[in-house]
């Protein structure tokens, strides 16, 4: 019997009625002949409520304690979904991260899964039960609770669990019915994609398509675990993320990604000598701050400017980490800007075809959008721009690359 | 360095301000030279809110799932108290029941502690940290979460943890400043007791003095673990529960206990043959329903009436369990009454002195209170009466035994 792992986000389990719906959906798949595992997020805005509770006590909650606190949100929803399955007459059991065998490293708030021991999950499945796993969490070797990083952590749980169970498919249920050529709330002419490669999805997810966490896609790619993005609200074929994708040779830009959540730090007057970058970025890595773009300007008079971007939520900690380092390396000062966003074009065909970059810059220029930073990968070009211009940029690029046409 | 284990209930950690107060109190004891462990309950009415959440999904939540759900309440408060200690500049760590090494049997909702492995707690204490333990919970051999029974479970955790750590003292903080000769909200002339024996406290706790869970007192007695009942709101010497108590030979009734939470079931026309009681009470024990009083009337024509009492919250399950048994044993029918309460007099000197029972019955009779059932132990006499008469009964007995006088 093949195993299907489903992932339900906070919106899908936000109240009792939706939880019953989730249970019905799980049962429908079981009745179609599958062994079922579902990974669930915390209900609605539970995580925010728990964070607010911590912030009533302290401005700077300890990260180990915060992990323990936040992990309760997913445990609550896992028990409620399990109870809903029981009322529908089906055997089911909830498992915490610990019980599901999810072992992580000790980087609190942003732990990485080291291994999954699927023994208990297999036992429960073989006993005829549906298994509901609390997402977003694992435990360290010392059995301390960790969480897998802001918001998207349950996606990672789902794909990792699917890989560990050698599941036929991992299905991620969201409030959209698949992946579009751009966010349809911003560009109404956006078109749904039937499938997409891991690489393309990874670039899109890393650059703001909030449908699935990039780490989850990366895991899917490593273990070749197909992931279906589909709707928990309407019946939909969804978008399948997998190794092979049906190419669309006439249009190599597949989709536009955007992100409103960009902060930029520039350290000015940095002495241009070896080891400076390591001195700067090692402490940031130790603080588990994800650096996105890094740009170093050409040196003039042995002084250079070094710019990098982080998520806005990490800006405060980043500044606190950077401040003593600026003095240590003898740089002049640093400035920060958190009113930024970014827009990206993504497609696997791009690297072999010239002209995409210039076409992108032209489209933004025609829309009177100033480009602050540019970064590229083999299958992506990203521009950092002012946050208020992100919406216009998405529309301009969607039109420029004619993405509304198949 | 001696270890003190403190227990804070839901009222003491109901909001951020009170949590900070709890943290201050813990630190004050640490500064006095003790290694500190605190066991905490869920905040305010969290447990009720979680129960309500479950009942939105189903009338009859699975008990294993309910345990997992409810255990999150204490985990949340344990992290918040720990964060509060951090903000006050003190090293601290929260531990779940699992991490604190609390192993239980598998009777969900009413688990018993089998053993405590204090290794992790000692490690943390020896590293200079204050340890905050989530009360009310443990894990089975299979690492499934269990809870220790309605409401008072965290008391049991605290005393068990104190015993396992060989603590100098277990301090239970409540909203009253000690144990009184009767509930002062009902009898304003009630007097605070300086100390009391385990046996007396056990009878009082079992019969409605809601200050500490009887199982906690029992554990204290087995391990000779002194327990101080004191106030989290005002400075107070409290009441010490311990082996030796300063006797008050002139008045052997120490205190009046009462309980509004009594339901009575009478099975009528029970064939009077051996094995009937076992047939009835074994299934109730398997359902983990606590039977309080059992009374069997003298047999007439080989038919007898069998009456027993349970907590009102257990009445529904009790009736469901009893119904098929009534048919099985060939009894006529059964009736239930959940509008009952009870009142008890307790004192270690009582068994050697005649006349206490008759004095009690006379006082109730003078107050026009009808006695429905009577049960006695060596140090207690209890009368089951109508719930609306409980308050009058407490006052009548307090006066009859002159408990306002030292």
Image: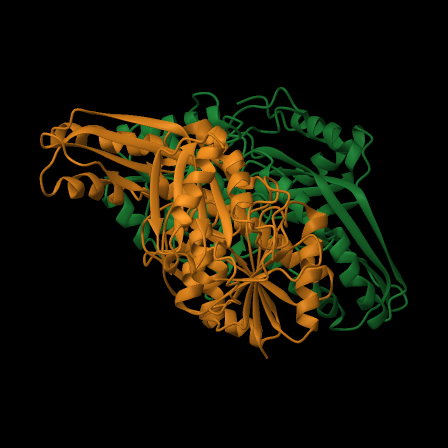
Chain colours: A orange, B green
**Quadrant location of the N terminus of chain A?**
bottom right
Q: Between residues A307 and A380, which one lies in front from this camera angle?
A: A380
Q: Is residue B114 visible?
A: no
x and y percentages locating residue A118 in the rendered image: 45, 70
x and y percentages locating residue A394 in the rendered image: 52, 40
Residue placed at 9% from the left, 43% from the top? A274
**For residue B27, side relative to residue B47 (left or right):** left
Question: What is the total number of numbered labels drawn onto the structure image?
Answer: 0
**Quadrant location of the C terminus of chain A?**
bottom right
Q: Is residue B397 visible?
A: yes
Residue placed at 57% from the left, 69% from the top? A4
Quarter of the image where one finds residue B395: top right
Residue situated furthest bottom in the rendering: A1
Relative height, residue A400 to residue B282 (above, below): above
x and y percentages locating residue B239 in the rendered image: 46, 31
Q: Between residues B13 and B65, which one lies in front from this camera angle?
A: B65
Relative height, residue A197 to residue B164 (above, below): below
x and y percentages locating residue A171 in the rendered image: 57, 62
Relative height, residue B319 to residue A10 (above, below): below
Residue placed at 70% from the left, 67% from the top? A28
Relative height, residue B96 to residue B35 (above, below): below
């Amino acid at each position: 019997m093949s195993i299907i792992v489903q992932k339900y986000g906070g919106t899908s389990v936000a109240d009792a009625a939706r939880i019953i719906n989730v249970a019905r959906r799980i049962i429908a798949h079981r009745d179609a002949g599958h062994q079922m595992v579902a990974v669930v997020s915390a209900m609605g805005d539970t995580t925010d409520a728990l964070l607010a509770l911590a912030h009533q006590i302290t401005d700077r909650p300890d990260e180990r304690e915060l992990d323990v606190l936040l992990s309760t949100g997913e445990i609550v929803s896992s028990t409620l979904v399990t109870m809903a399955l029981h009322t529908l007459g089906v055997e089911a059991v909830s498992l915490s991260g610990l019980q599901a065998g999810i072992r992580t490293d000790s980087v609190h708030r942003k732990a990485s899964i080291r291994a999954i021991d699927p023994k208990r999950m297999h036992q429960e499945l073989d006993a005829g039960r549906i298994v509901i796993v609390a997402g977003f969490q694992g435990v360290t070797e010392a059995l301390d609770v960790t969480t897998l990083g802001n918001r998207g952590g349950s996606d990672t749980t789902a794909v990792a669990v699917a890989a560990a169970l050698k599941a036929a498919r991992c299905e991620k249920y969201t409030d959209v019915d698949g992946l579009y050529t751009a966010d349809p709330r911003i560009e109404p002419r956006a078109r749904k994609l039937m499938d997409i490669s891991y690489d393309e999805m990874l670039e899109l997810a890393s650059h703001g398509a909030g449908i699935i966490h990039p780490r989850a896609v990366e895991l899917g790619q490593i273990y070749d675990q197909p992931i279906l993005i589909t709707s928990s609200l309407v019946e939909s074929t969804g978008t399948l993320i997998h190794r092979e994708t049906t190419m669309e040779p006439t249009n190599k830009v597949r989709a536009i990604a955007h992100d409103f959540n960009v902060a930029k730090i520039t350290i000015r007057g940095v002495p241009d000598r070896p080891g400076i970058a390591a001195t700067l970025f090692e402490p940031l890595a130790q603080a588990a701050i994800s650096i996105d773009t890094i740009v170093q300007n050409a040196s003039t008079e042995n002084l250079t400017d070094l710019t990098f971007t982080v998520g806005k939520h990490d800006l405060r900690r980043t500044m606190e980490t950077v401040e003593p380092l600026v003095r240590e390396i003898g740089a002049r000062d640093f400035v920060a800007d958190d009113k930024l966003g970014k827009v990206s074009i993504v497609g696997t065909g791009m690297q072999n075809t010239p002209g995409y970059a210039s076409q992108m810059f032209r489209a933004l220029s025609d829309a009177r959008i100033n480009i602050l930073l540019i970064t590229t990968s083999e299958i992506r070009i990203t521009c950092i721009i002012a946050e208020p211009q992100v919406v216009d940029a998405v529309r301009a690029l969607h039109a420029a690359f004619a993405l509304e046409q198949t």
